[in-house]
Amino acid sequence: MSALEHRIGMEITSKSHSTVVQARPVFEERLSIVSPEGLPGKEFLRDVEKILVSGRLTNGAFVREFEAAAAAYLGVPHCVAVSSCSVGLALTLRALGLHGEVILPSFTFHATAHCALWNSLEPVFADCDPSTFCILPGAVRAQISAKTAAILAVHVFGHPAPVSELDEIAAQYNLRVIYDAAHAFGSKIHETHVGSSGAAEVFSFSPTKLVVAGEGGLITTRDGVLAERLRAARNYGDTGNYDPELPGLNGRMSEFHAALALRGLDSLEARIARRNQIRIRYEERLGRIPGLRFQKTSAHHRSTCKDFCVLVDEAEFGCSRDQLFRSLMGANIEVKRYFWPPVHRQKIYREIWDKRPLPITDCVSERILNLPIYSSLQDSDVEKICDAILELHEHSISSRRLRPQNRT
């Protein structure tokens, strides 16, 4: 086993020629991998009525109330609501006046990298940690050059990035750090909520997140000057005098989205706790099956568990990640492969990346499979999913033993 294989606890093998098990449906209708969280009832309809009566449909009372509530929850002085996390990241990079290279992970959703390109910044990819899947500080150091302006880190699946190490690197090289916190509203580092690190952090409230605004994002920062620039940037760069100071765009959050997000803050802690219960049950059941490994949650950190994933070692499990994917989909269990292919292997970025290897990212990406997780997921459904995976493992191993061996 190579040093890399030993490090990530996986054995890299050649592709198997085994056939895919045709799984029987476990659910009559497909079990979704996600379900919108914390959607309100009639109280939200009353909010909508208030908005319509007020005639103020954007940047009004509900936006201000949501920003204040989020600031209190996260423990940060400044929150700027925007129309999406992607817009928030793009505006933040612009408001910071960055030029040159930005170091970021390839193991992320491609919107993270798109925001750099939109600002004419050159993305430089760094490898990920084999346990947490977040950006690896040593890999960041290896990519620093005279052109490096910033580090754009990601709290992957809600697991906090290595903030203290990245802060140390940034201070040493005079770099800005921005966090893509799309998955992490409610995550903690020790007892501190994610949201107060770096120059800014940016959250998402799209339908797959734990707080849902329909669409929406939030930028958090301790820098009052940056916050004011961002408030102007989300309004075409206009501070109110019709004389823009920077080339902003329409990144405003509507009152309807803010009201929905505000209601979604209710019982958030209970939803995070429930998702972690589901994570633990998955790990208890699936951890008994050879060839499956999970994202490791660091001690003293809390993840929102926005996603739950397994890494599949074909040699030990008995079939490949893609065979497991097809089998579970055939069993009416929706699964995804986040993030595959990694960003540096996607069409746009293949043309600009200089082919420096990212072996851990490639290894994780080629083996990852995301399972259903949301706070309303029933324990019985979790058990059925685990049973289906165990059944496939046992069938695959049995078939392998019965398969005729090639004779020379």
Image (cartoon, helix red, strand yellow):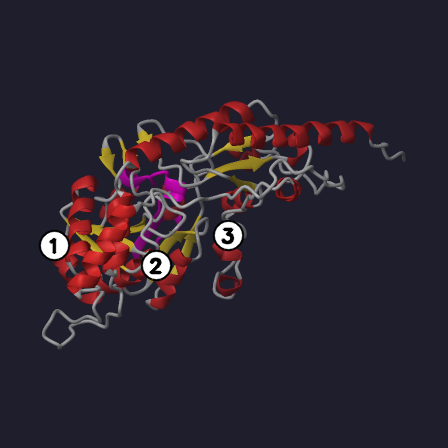
The residue that mark 1 highlights is 224
Q: Secondary structure at mark 1?
A: helix
The residue that mark 2 highlights is 86
* Residue 335 falls in image quadrant: top right
Count the labels in the image: 3
The residue that mark 3 highlights is 342
Q: Residue at x 33, y 52 (%)?
A: 152
* Residue 325 falls in image quadrant: top right
- Give the distance between the C-alpha atoms of the residues marked 3 and 2, in whole angstroms: 18 Å
Q: Indicate whether 282 appears above or below 177.
A: above
Indicate which disc, 1 or 2, sits on the residue closer to the N terminus.
2
Q: Position of residue 63 (x, y in %)?
A: 19, 56
Determine contact: label 1, label 3, CB under 8 Å. no
Q: Amino acid at mark 1?
A: Gly
- Which span of residues is magenta-colored? 141-165
Q: Position of residue 200 (x, y in %)?
A: 23, 51
Q: Indicate whether 262 appears above or below 273.
A: below
Q: Residues within 10 Å of mark 2 (few under 14, many from 20)?
A: many
Q: Nearer the viewer, mark 1 or mark 2?
A: 2
Indicate which disc, 3 or 2, sits on the residue closer to the N terminus.
2
Q: Position of residue 101 (x, y in %)?
A: 34, 61
- Give the distance between the C-alpha atoms of the residues marked 1 and 2, in whole angstroms: 21 Å
